[in-house]
Image: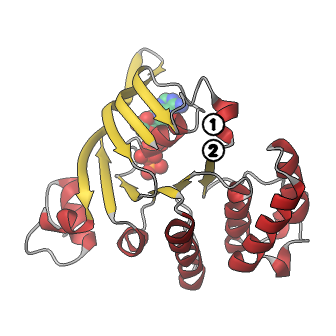
Amino acid sequence: MIELDRAGRTFKVKRNVVHAVTDLSFTVAEGEFVGYLGPNGAGKSTTIKMLCGILTPTSGKVRVAGLDPSRRRTTLARRIGVVFGQRTTLWWDLPLADSFQLIRHLYKVDRKEFAARLAELTETLGLDAFIRTPVRQLSLGQRMRGDLAAALLHAPDVLVLDEPTIGLDVVGKAGIRDFLRRLNAERGTTVLLTTHDLGDIERLCRRVMLIDHGRLAFDGTLDDLMATAPGQSSIEEVVTRLYTGSSMP
Ligand SMILES: Nc1ncnc2c1ncn2[C@@H]1O[C@H](COP(=O)(O)OP(=O)(O)OP(=O)(O)O)[C@@H](O)[C@H]1O
């Protein structure tokens, strides 16, 4: 479903070249739920932007659902859903329901299918209480649920999430996690989840990839990840060791 073959992305900043992602190769199969971890500035968002076609790789190959994202961005948009936790894709001044209608038109979703999907998402994400509220008046947790629904209205095969639980309280996080777990288990939607919240990783991901300085530093199961640091009992300790090369202070 997702395939990177020695993908790289550089940025020119004045006279310097920043290597945001270097020689990155991995595949994510249909139906997988994969956590994508890495310290600040490791290259996670750059990877995600290459996956949805916002950025073109400067070397190597990226394929999502068999498509080259930067060349086939419109076609790919029908197969992929993307949520950037720090930024909404909804229309700020419109009620959530109107944003959803605009998305229906943009993605040319059949009216009946749309109604059925919206009813299901309204129920599972508990949107009813605020679906008529303008997006700018929503709380962060409500807005995130709205963004998730918006990303799923066209029933994409793959969902890419960039920090979907950032800033949410424990109840809000639990709701989003439960929703994502069911989406993957019941619908078979492939999920790539970028997060700094290791609780998200522990509770949701069978497989974890870790990127550091733009390169893949680890790819394996959660158990494999824990085994990289024998004697460390928490995922925080293990990940700290991987990020810094030493254990937690
Ligand atoms: N548009 C850009 N121009 C120049 N440099 C960039 C640009 N976008 C990203 N970078 C650089 O590329 C590197 C990777 O950034 P990226 O945003 O992918 O990291 P990240 O892993 O998502 O970090 P964070 O966890 O802090 O969000 C960083 O050094 C960043 O400064």
Please give the residue where the numbered disc 1 appears in the rendered image: 76
Q: Is residue 86 left or right of residue 3?
A: right
| Image position, residue 50 (x, y; %) | 51, 34
Q: Is residue 204 left or right of residue 222?
A: right
For the residues marked 2 and 1, what is the alpha-carbon distance in whole angstroms? 5 Å
Look at 54% across and 31% down and name the residue there. 67
Look at 89% across and 71% down and name the residue there. 133
| Image position, residue 201 (x, y; %) | 38, 68
Quick one: SS at disc 2?
loop
Q: Is residue 177 left or right of residue 232?
A: right
Q: Which is more toward the observer, 153 or 162? A: 153
* Residue lying farthest to the top in this orientation: 15
Please give the residue where the numbered disc 2 appears in the rendered image: 79
Look at 84% across and 69% down and name the residue there. 137
Crowd around label 2: few <14 · some 14–19 · many ≥20 (10 Å): some
Whether 158 is drawn above or below 113: the answer is: above
| Image position, residue 212 (x, y; %) | 29, 44
Q: Amino acid at mark 2?
A: Arg
Q: Are marks 2 and 1 in contact (CB under 8 Å)?
A: yes
Q: Amino acid at mark 1?
A: Leu
Residue 95 visible somewhere in the drawing? no
